[in-house]
Each structure stands twice: as C-alpha cells, then as structure tokens.
C-alpha cells in the first residue's frame, strides 16, 4: 500500500474527519478533511502530469507549512515522484544550489519554480477520481556537505507499507499509535516532514503550525489533546519561557521525540518535569540512516547527557590510528546495521569513511561502561588550543546554562602562541548591555579546564540558527574574519 493509497483508504473510512488542521501565527485555523485531501491531491496529481512532471522524477516542494504543502506532497507521491522538501525561504544563492542539486521540477514561488503553489486551483477541469499508482513514492533530504554546498540524500525506505504492519515495533516503543493527534512544529524541510506524513499513514490528526509561536503550544495541546510531537532544543527552551506553560494540561502527551543536539541539561530536566520522563524520547540519527540510537527520559536521568544505546545498529568508537577506544575515551563514532550502506544521492555525493563495514558521519563521542553514547561534537569543529583538542559543543553546553545567555556558538580564532583560541558568540536579550565578561570568565572557569575557557566574546541578538535548530559555524567564522 502506497502513501497515496492509504490516504484514499482513510478518506473512504471517515471522509469528514479532520486530517490536517493548519494553524496560522495568529491562531486562526484552516481544516482539511480526509475527503478533501483525497480529492485535492488527485486533482493536483493530474495537474502535475499535465505539466509534464513524470512518474519517478524528482519534485522539489518548496512550499510553506500548511494545507498547500500537504496536498502538493501527497499529489507528487500519487504519481510515484521522488519528493525533495526544500526551504521555501532559501536565499537566491541557496535556491540556485538546491535546484542544481535536485535536478528536477521545483514547486514553489519565485524564479526557481516551474510549478506555482496550489496549482490545482488554477488548472480547470481536473478529475478528482483516484490516480493510477505509479512507481513506489520516495523522498530525499537536503543536507549540507563539508564544503557547505547541499547534497541530496535519498531516503532508503519508500513511502509504501505492508497493510498488516502500518505501525512498526519502533513506533510502539516510542509512544506512537493509530488515531492520535500530532502537533507538527518543525520545518517541512526538516524532521517535520517525516513526522507529518508518517502520521497521516497512522491516521493521525495533524495539527500543523504554519510558523512556530511558543504561546500557542500549550493552547493547541490542550484543545486537540495532542499525543505526540517532535521537537528540538531551541523550541524546548522557548516553550519553557512561555508564560503559564506550567499550568497547562499536558497530560495527553505520550510521545515527545527530541532530536539529539546541544540541549542544556537544565532545559532537559525541566522538560522531564513538564512531561513525565517515560514520555520523552531522545534520538541520534541522520538522513544517511546509518543507525538509530535512542534514550527514554527515565534512562536519561540515570545517564544525563547521553543520547542512548543503539536500537538497530552497532557502535564503535575509533581512535585516529584506527584502534578501538576504551570506555569513556573520545573518538570518532562509527555505526553499522544490517542495512548499512553508502548513502544514495541525487546528482552524486561523497562516500562516507568506512572501517570494516562501519560508516561514520564525522561525529565524535564516547561510550560509558554500560554502552550509552555521549556526543561531544564533530571532527570538523574540533579546535587545537595549544596542542589540546577542544570540543565546541562541550563549551556551548556550559554557556547555554548561564541565565543571561539565550544561545551560544563557539568557534576558533587565530592565536599567535596557541595556534587557536576559543571565541564565544553569545545571543543575549540586549547586545548593548551584555553580561559582564569577567563574570562570564569566572562562570566558565568553575566548570571548564583552562584550555576550554573562552578568551573572547561577541554578543548578538540573533545567532542565525535555522527553524530546525541548525547552526552555521562557517558563517560565524566568515563574519568574525
């Protein structure tokens, strides 16, 4: 059963049930029923075919979160396209690079798009009867490479399902079930995409925020009895700061899926108090899908800072000389699962480094005595301060817990004697009245060894972190330079 066939099946079972509720920043709602999703996506699929979009071809969907995105993707999959969700707000330079990398039709606005948003409304006379199934629907994700240029990684699994196994064992273990209400807050070109469209297969009612507004979080959870959502540390912190969040009824939530990243320990602990620990799941994975590592909140309390143990893979921590690291020793993380293989790209891409069928993304970390994985950063980001390896993520984690710091990024700057020195760029409420650097220095000295204490600081009101919580260190280095 393909994704599109499942949409048709659910439209037949309960045509008037809400499939998607699109929530604007002002709180107003637009509802799409299952019958409407089926009808509009069939019309839109025929509109794509009429515009010479061929089955199996890549289709980039650069459409903002909302009803238009859901219909566009469903329609493209109904003709068996390979869908690549892209950032609709990309700059002209980014658009040119992404379009070249995808090598297919772009649905969106502006000069880079061949198909406008909501094209099915402009194309008259389109039939809304079911579309014949084309090739198996697929998707791919844009990922920044080591050069900063995008590469398009094709998802291994197709968007087709065994009708008798729509809900996997992994879904059940992480709190997912049929018929839940799911809140989608992350961008469509990030983890929001997979959560939304897999949720449709599970007959979820998708409550989709067109733009993340912290004050709406508690209201939507209460109103729709939200059961599950995916989140990143940046949004976790903003929600905690939303007035009255602790008074909201969040008892319906059974599955919070947190992406691994630089989450301050104080923020994580606050979320485990806000939502019961057994309902909070953190994971470490990637679009290359080398393996999956997960940890539940109650486990995390026993291993604070860990991203968990492998669920479908093996982990090796490797020293620079290729030997295996001891427990507690930092090295490069290599993963292997029964399906591990080099990633497949649209338009080509680099091979990952391999050792004995284990592959690495260049992330660094260590395993404790019980096999729990701890991340410390990426090999490309490691600083050499007077001969000592310094991991920016460790310093950022300390700075993020400072009460006056909203966000933090650590980079290396040239130093006459040390080679590199630690420089911190801090996001604060008012850069004109930043925290006292002497006090920051004392704060860091209490928590970090001397080589890791920043030697200089810059202050800003915006680090430029993306909606998905990603941080562009290269741009910070260029700005500093």
Image: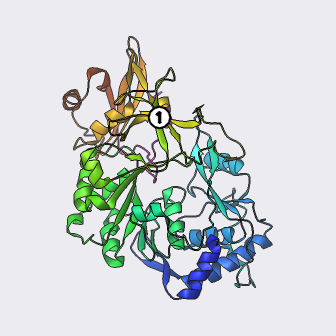
| Position of 231 relative to 324 (above/below) | below
Left or right of residue 140: residue 195: left
Residue at screen point 25% across, 40% down: 433
| Position of 246 relative to 461 (above/below) | below
Q: How crowded is mark 1: few (under 14 residues within 10 Å), some or many (20 or more)?
A: many
Residue at screen point 37% across, 14% down: 386
Q: Which of 419 and 299 is in front in this view?
A: 299
Residue at screen point 32% across, 26% down: 456
On the image, which quarter does residue 476 sit in?
A: top left
Identify residue for label 1. Answer: 316
Residue 129 picture location, percent across and down? 71, 85
Give, as a single range, the part of the protein colored magenta. Answer: 458-481
Residue 405 picture location, percent across and down? 27, 42
On the image, which quarter does residue 4 sit in?
A: bottom right
Identify the image quadrant of the N terminus.
bottom right
Residue at screen point 42% across, 77% down: 28
């Amino acid at each position: 059963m393909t994704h599109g066939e499942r949409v048709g099946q659910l439209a037949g079972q309960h045509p008037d049930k809400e499939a998607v509720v699109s929530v604007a920043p002002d709180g107003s709602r637009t509802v799409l029923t299952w019958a409407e999703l089926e009808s509009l996506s069939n019309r839109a699929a025929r509109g794509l075919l009429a515009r010479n979009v061929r089955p199996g071809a890549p289709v980039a969907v650069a459409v903002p979160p909302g009803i238009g995105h859901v219909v566009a993707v469903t329609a493209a999959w109904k003709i068996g396209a390979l869908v690549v969700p892209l950032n609709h707000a990309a700059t002209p330079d980014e658009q040119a690079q992404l379009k070249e990398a995808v090598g297919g039709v772009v649905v969106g606005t502006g000069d880079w798009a061949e198909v406008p948003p909501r094209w099915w409304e402009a194309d008259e006379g389109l039939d809304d009867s079911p579309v014949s199934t084309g090739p198996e629907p697929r998707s791919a994700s844009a990922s920044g490479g080591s050069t900063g240029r995008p590469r398009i990684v094709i998802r291994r699994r197709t968007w087709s399902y065994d009708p008798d196994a729509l809900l996997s064992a992994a879904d059940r273990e992480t709190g997912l079930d049929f018929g839940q209400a799911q809140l989608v807050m992350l961008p469509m070109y990030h983890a929001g995409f997979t959560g939304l469209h897999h949720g449709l297969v599970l007959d979820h009612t998708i409550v989709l925020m067109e733009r993340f507004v912290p004050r709406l979080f508690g209201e939507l959870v209460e109103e729709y009895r939200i059961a599950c959502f995916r989140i990143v540390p940046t949004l976790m912190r903003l929600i905690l700061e939303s007035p009255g969040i602790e008074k909201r009824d969040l008892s319906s939530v059974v599955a919070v899926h947190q992406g691994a990243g630089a989450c301050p320990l104080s923020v994580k602990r606050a979320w485990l108090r806000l939502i019961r620990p057994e309902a909070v799941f953190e994971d470490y994975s990637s679009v290359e899908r080398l393996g999956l590592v997960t940890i539940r909140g109650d486990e995390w309390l026993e291993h604070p800072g860990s991203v968990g143990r492998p669920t479908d893979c093996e982990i090796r921590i490797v020293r620079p000389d290729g030997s295996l690291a001891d427990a507690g020793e930092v090295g490069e993380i290599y993963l292997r699962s029964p399906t591990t293989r080099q990633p497949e790209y649209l338009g080509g891409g680099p091979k990952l480094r391999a050792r004995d069928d284990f592959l690495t993304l260049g992330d660094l970390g260590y395993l404790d005595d019980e096999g729990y994985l701890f991340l410390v950063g990426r090999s490309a980001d490691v600083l050499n301060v007077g001969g000592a390896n310094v991991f920016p993520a460790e310093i950022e984690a300390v700075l993020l817990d400072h009460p006056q710091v909203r966000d933090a990024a650590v980079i290396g700057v040239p130093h006459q004697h040390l080679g590199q020195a630690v420089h911190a760029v801090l996001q604060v409420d008012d850069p004109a009245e930043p925290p006292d650097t002497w006090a920051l220095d004392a704060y860091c000295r209490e928590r970090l060894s001397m080589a890791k204490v920043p030697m200089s600081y810059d202050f800003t009101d915006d680090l430029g972190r993306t909606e998905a919580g990603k941080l562009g260190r290269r741009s910070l280095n260029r700005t500093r330079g």
